[in-house]
Image: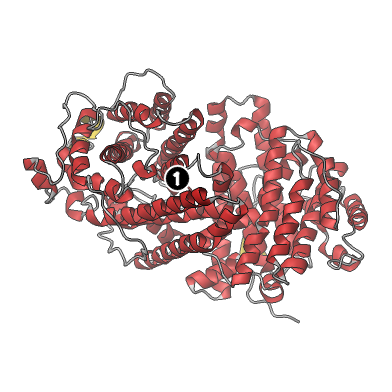
Amino acid sequence: MTVQPFQLPEFYTPYPARLNPALEHARVHSKAWARAMGMIEGSGVWDCADFDAHDYALLCAYTHPECDAGELDLVTDWYVWVFFFDDHFLECYKRTQDFAGARAYLGRLASFMPVGGPEMPAPTNPVEAGLAELWARTVPAMSADWRQRFADSTRALLDESLWELENINEGRVSNPIEYIEMRRKVGGAPWSANLVEHATGAEVPARVAASRPLRVLRDTFSDGVHLRNDLFSYQRETQEEGELANCVLVLERFLGYGPQQAAEATNDLLTSRLQQFEHTVLTELAPLFAEHGLDAFEQARVLKYAQGLQDWQAGGHEWHMRSSRYMNSGARSTRLGGPVGLGTSAARLGWRSRARRVAPFAPVGHLPVPELYMPFQVRQNQYLDLARRDVLDWSDAAGFFSVVPRAAATRPSVWTRESLAGIDLAVCAAGLDPDGTADELIMGTRWLSWGTYADDYFPQVFSAVGDMAGARVFVDRLSQIMGGAALVPANPVESGLADLWPRTVCAMSADGAARYRAAVESMLTSWLWELDNHRRRRIPDPVDYIEMRRRTFGSDLTMSLSRLAHERTLPAALFATRPMQNLDNAAADHACFVNDLFSYQKEVQYEGEVHNIVFVVEHFLSVPRDTAVTIVRDLMDERMRQFEHIARTELPLVADHFDLDTAAREALHRYVTELRHWLAGVLQWHRDTNRYDEAVLSGAAHTPAPAAHWLRTGNLTGPQFPRPAASRLTTPRTAQAHVSPLAHPHLMGSIPSA
């Protein structure tokens, strides 16, 4: 008898599994269907005994307990197909490491999922035959929006198998963030979520399908499904298949844990993701319904969909406990008593939450920032001094030094001229855009000033009193300004944006301006998420934190501008590829965590914040601060090495796939170079600014040299810059009415938020 590598942990299972009464019908039907598709006899993958032992009909009867017999047959056939694909791909391509054959095989499968295009080719193997038959049976009942989403998730499920194969070929175990992101695609749970819509008859309304609450429901569902599977399948995958894509193995390698400790940590993350799902249902759906004006029928569909995802989690666990496919000896579950239904687990006896709540303003003291791996050199723009002077005058004209409502008596304004000089945002902009013109650097520094001021203004005005309603109005008015509404600015943030926006988008296409507006709105709405957690004193789930941190930091703005700068040379589809998305996310995470390390004391001790990666790791893993810092540093180093790995080994393949010409390849190289400047510049600015100095935080510091010198004397080196009139917002020093950022896409940079 094979010894299990670890004792399965105690699982959080707040909802009981229910069994669809049409189980036996689905068993008979699915076996006949699999045989007809050629998946059993003669496939070289399964025989009859394998099929019976896996019992996919039992999985579907548990995960879809309320659908009728016909729907259960359809759903079961889909799961037979996806598990056969997984095993077929293993035998034909993973074991043989046939990368070229795998790419050709997966490329053909896309032709069997027409959303409304040409007819399918003739199938040549059981996987193609099954997909063709299922697609024709499934999509007629659904909208064009659902068909596109289902086609996208199915293609991701298929195509990202190449990521697993690439890692096996290289013997590479992914870092934890990369793993969670990629497991969603290759693991198939987003695809399962689409099928839940079909099985429950509850298609999500198109206008909210891409919203944060629905995305979080889908992603937490996906993570729950995959992390649970990783625990049950660890022995099979690591000992029999040579698989490297398993969270237990990832945490073993990254944290230096043994299998048992890594399994417990994986289970803690699983529990946290399930409780994030519940939190989202309870706190984010109602505001979503109101914001988008969903009628009662549409609201009921969303809630039924969420209930279907919940049923899937409960049923999926029960199937893993029973299936011969997995290691399940000695598995334990926490069964809770009390009410049963969507979002009721918090009220049930025995509920234990992974979400932590802490008292604010703990005296944590200074955090020494460790040495960080930074392979790129920072360069400074020659017009740095011009931008330094301009941003002080522009910020003054925008009202950034004026008294604000709800301000403390000891701090009537968010900023003073002296405090902004000490922050020295021009140094940040100059490092991000070392080759920009004077006008480009000036505009970039103004954007950084606006975003950083807005990020400081927002908590002082809204977070201090928990004013969610006022915060929503604030965000909505900024959106209206970007939409061209002729609003009289009601505060300095509006005044600054009203000046910057037309200058920035004037040279963009309508589509480009819309995408850039969406990126700004992504940052602004993420502050509402922070405010909600702040009101509840809730430390966010670590995965949710990392994904939202990219938005709160303004990373989306940087990426958006960079892409717009190259949109005439590089195809839009290139930026949607896995390597490009992973490149952007690796860069964003490194920059965000740089900010979190340097701002730890400012945020936790002086602002009562809970949104900091060190703080999140401390509380999630229950480790001392120094241990959390080491983990964060190691994660940053891994993300940086992933960035280098993608640029070195994956992007050339992307360029070949799109058959890029010389000009396009040069543009792709420039895009990567701009991200390198961004990474180096963000780190250098955090080292140079006084924004995080303890003396400044405690209010005891004076503006340091050289900032104090040029504040006092106005003497700067380099070309002279005509001083703007203090009574109005001015253009940069040229006579141009507008300055576009597109010549240098890092004009905006990222908001040093904290």
Q: Quick one: 539 or 506, which is closer to the camera?
A: 506
Q: Is residue 499 visible?
A: yes
Which residue is label 1 attached to? 559
Quadrant in which the N terminus appears: bottom right
Q: Relative to the observer, which residue lies in front, 214 or 522?
A: 522
Q: Nearer the viewer, residue 357 or 83?
A: 83
In the rendered image of this protein, does residue 403 appear above or below residue 183? above
The residue lying at 13 percent from left, 46 percent from top is 717
**Drawn side of residue 519 relative to residue 332, left or right:** left
- Relative image position of residue 316 (x, y in whole percent): 72, 55
Residue 146 percent across, percent down from the top left: 70, 37
State the residue at coordinates (27%, 37%). 439
| Residue 472 to residue 415: above or below | above
Element type where label 1 sits in the image: helix
The image position of residue 624, as x and y in percent, is 37, 66
Q: x%, y% of residue 456?
A: 30, 40
Residue farthest to the front? 662
**Which colour scheme appears in the figure?**
secondary structure
